[in-house]
Amino acid sequence: MTSVAYVTKKLKDCTRKLETGDITKEEADEIYYDFLKDPRSVQKKSLSKALCRWYKQVEKKLPEPGNYVVTVSLDIRGRYSVDTEIAMRACMKKLDLADAVCTFEVNEQDHVFAEKLKGMTRVIKCYISLRAGEIRRALGDTFDDLVPVIEGYVAFMGSDGFGGKMEENPCEVIAERVYGELVSYIVYNSKVPAARISCSSEKYVGYIPCQVAVFSKDLHLFSFIPSAEETFRLALRAGIIDREAAGRFINGRTVRNFSVRKFVEQMTDLLTAERRIEEEKLAELEDGSWTDIIL
């Protein structure tokens, strides 16, 4: 184990480097794995102060990209000294959203992401990292090419697992959850590579920001999905929900004894049927044979 004097000096040197530039990848790993995780960082005041100074400088630098970003932990929960926690929480709030990603859940087209994320902790279809920027950097250009089909609290409250497991029994729900379920279900069953990306809860107070994302080239495949409000209006016109439920959803109120699964399955059938009709109409218009009638 390295001496406290070495660690303190190294942190001071890195802090000075960060004032005018960046640190190396090796230095970032050393800070995160060796210095931050060192139990002495809580016990030794000099080490705690050095870490605190480091993270205060990190906060000043954020959200600029750099090797230094990965020294920030996305999981604090009483692991460090009080001063270090305060400094790190301030860093987490300034992270670029992409650097705050802590879970990356994929649909069954897993091979697109599996190779780049193979060294990461995995639970079923979910890759997990509690280190800022690690998932973004592991995926590289692949991550940058992902665009959200849906984002926010709605996606987080979507299906329980990207595999499409939904609440079987009627329950009390809000519009964001129901709409998130619907979009997640449609994206999952589209058979295109997709991911549900959630971020550290420390970045936003009160909820975990999340998005269901696909590759930019595939985004047009989901253009037939209307906005949340229009979805509920369409469901009302189609007789899938009643006027009271539609009104409560549109006005942001909860609906009791609501069957999420039934709604999602019926709306998916309706939306995909309408899409097929539109595609058939477009195909007819593009067919040059209609000019024969005019002539």
Image (cartoon, rainbow, N blue to C red):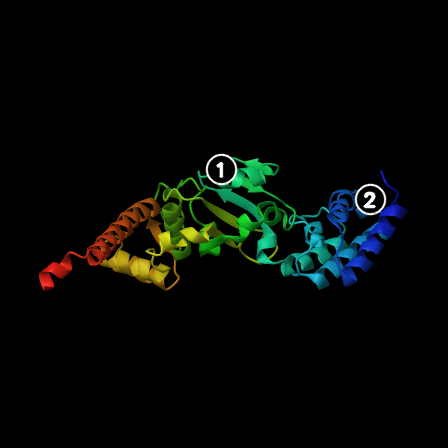
**In this orientation, does residue 102 appear?**
yes
Closer-to-camera residue (281/236): 281
Q: Residues within 10 Å of mark 1 (few under 14, many from 20)?
A: few
Image coords of residue 97 (percent x, y): 58, 57
184 vs 100, left or right, is: left
Residue 95 image position (x, y, % from top left): 63, 58
- Label 2: few (<14), some or many (≥20) within 10 Å? some
Q: Secondary structure at mark 2?
A: helix
| 35 to the left or right of 245 | right
In three-dimensional space, the C-alpha distance between marks 1 and 2, rounded to whole angstroms, equals 41 Å
Hey, what amino acid is under mark 1? His
Q: Is residue 173 visible?
A: no
- Tag 2: amino acid: Arg
Quarter-of-image position of residue 37: top right
Q: Is residue 76 left or right of residue 273?
A: right
- Camera-nearest label, 1 or 2: 1
The disc placed on residue 40 is 2
Q: Secondary structure at mark 1?
A: helix
Q: Residue at x 77, y 51 (%)?
A: 81
In the displayed structure, 203 sits above or below 116; it is below
Residue 281's tag is none
Image coords of residue 187 (percent x, y): 39, 47
Which labelled disc corresponds to residue 111?
1
Task: Between residue 102 and residue 147, name the one nearer to us.
Answer: 147
The residue at 56%/45% (across/down) is 103
Identify the image quadrant of the N terminus.
Answer: top right
| Residue in the picture at 61% in, 44% down | 129
- Quadrant for the C terminus, please: bottom left
